[in-house]
Image (cartoon, rainbow, N blue to C red):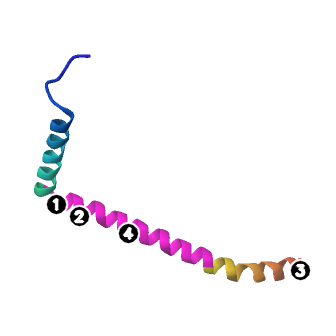
Amino acid sequence: MSELGMTEDGLKQTVKDALVEVLEERRDILRDVIEEVLEEFEMIEDYKEVRKSDGLRRRPVFAMSEGEA
């Protein structure tokens, strides 16, 4: 394999510098991504709460409806 003339540490630093530059120039992108992740996390937590509370309420109703059939 041919050598590119860049060390692994040099490549890491170049990638870090590029990311910092992008984030400084386009902070709105990072803000949007973080906002979406937090909204999805909140939705997942809400879903878990509904499932937990819905499961407690549904079992007795389901049992009663089985007896009526």
Given this view, does label 3 or label 4 mark the residue nearer the observer?
4
In terms of sequence position, does the residue under pointer 3 or pointer 1 come before the other? Answer: 1
- What distance separates the C-alpha of mark 3 from that of mark 1? 60 Å
Q: Are marks 1 and 2 in contact (CB under 8 Å)?
A: yes
- The quarter in which the C terminus is drawn is bottom right
Q: Predominant secondary structure in magenta? A: helix
Give the Cα distance between marks 3 and 4.
42 Å
**Vertical side of 68 occupied by 33: above or below:** above
Q: Which quadrant holds residue 11?
A: top left
Q: Are marks 3 and 4 in contact (CB under 8 Å)?
A: no
Mark 4 lies on a secondary structure that is helix
Q: Which residue is mark 2?
A: 31
Residue 61 picture location, percent across and down: 76, 82
The image quarter in which residue 9 lies: top left
Residue closest to the eye, 64 or 68: 64
For residue 45, side relative to residue 15 (left or right): right
Type of amino acid under label 4: Glu
